Amino acid sequence: MADFSVNKAVAKIYQDINKHGILKVPVLLDEETKGVIHQVLSVGFLGEQRDPIVTIKKSNGESVAYRLPDDLCGWAENCMVLKLQGVDMLPAEVEFGILNNKAYAKFYKV
């Protein structure tokens, strides 16, 4: 039996959350500095602790699932609630950063 499944975005979702890397989020000096922008394909929760995960489309086209920092649990929950209400925000470009010691994620508009 495999220790992972494959989600709709063709990313491996491991049964053991610790096999997923944590999304690297840059620390920003001020509000004028932009965070890192990722193409987010999906958001969900995994495991008994309901750890938030995000599937990112990398520049080479590969889809990879990452754990999110704990600060982004609320953002992930909001994405899931909106989807249940019929508003699917994903896939979308999302900006991630850490400002004033708190991680954030916001939908990016050009």
Image (cartoon, rainbow, N blue to C red):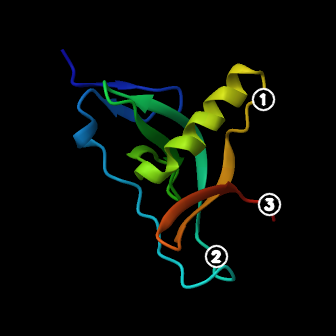
Distance (Cα) linking label 1 and label 2:
26 Å
Q: Amino acid at mark 3?
A: Lys
Residue 65, located in which quarter of the rendered image? top left
Image-based side of 52 in relation to 106, left or right: left
Residue 37, located in which quarter of the rendered image? bottom right
Distance (Cα) linking label 3 and label 1:
17 Å
Helix, strand, or loop for circle 3? Answer: loop
- Contact, CB < 8 Å: mark 2 with mark 3? no
Q: Amino acid at mark 2?
A: Lys
- The x, y position of residue 40, in whole percent, is 59, 47
Question: What residue is shown at x 21% (from left), y 24% (from top)?
Answer: 3
Q: Which residue is mark 1?
A: 87
Distance (Cα) linking label 2 and label 3:
12 Å
Residue 53, disc: none
Question: What residue is shown at x 54% (from left), y 67% (from top)?
Answer: 97
- The x, y position of residue 47, in whole percent, is 32, 26
Q: Which residue is mark 3?
A: 109
Looking at marks 3 and 1 on the same chain, the residue that comes earlier in the sequence is marked by: 1
- Contact, CB < 8 Å: mark 3 with mark 1? no
Q: Which residue is mark 2?
A: 34
Residue farthest toward the left in the current orientation of the protein: 1
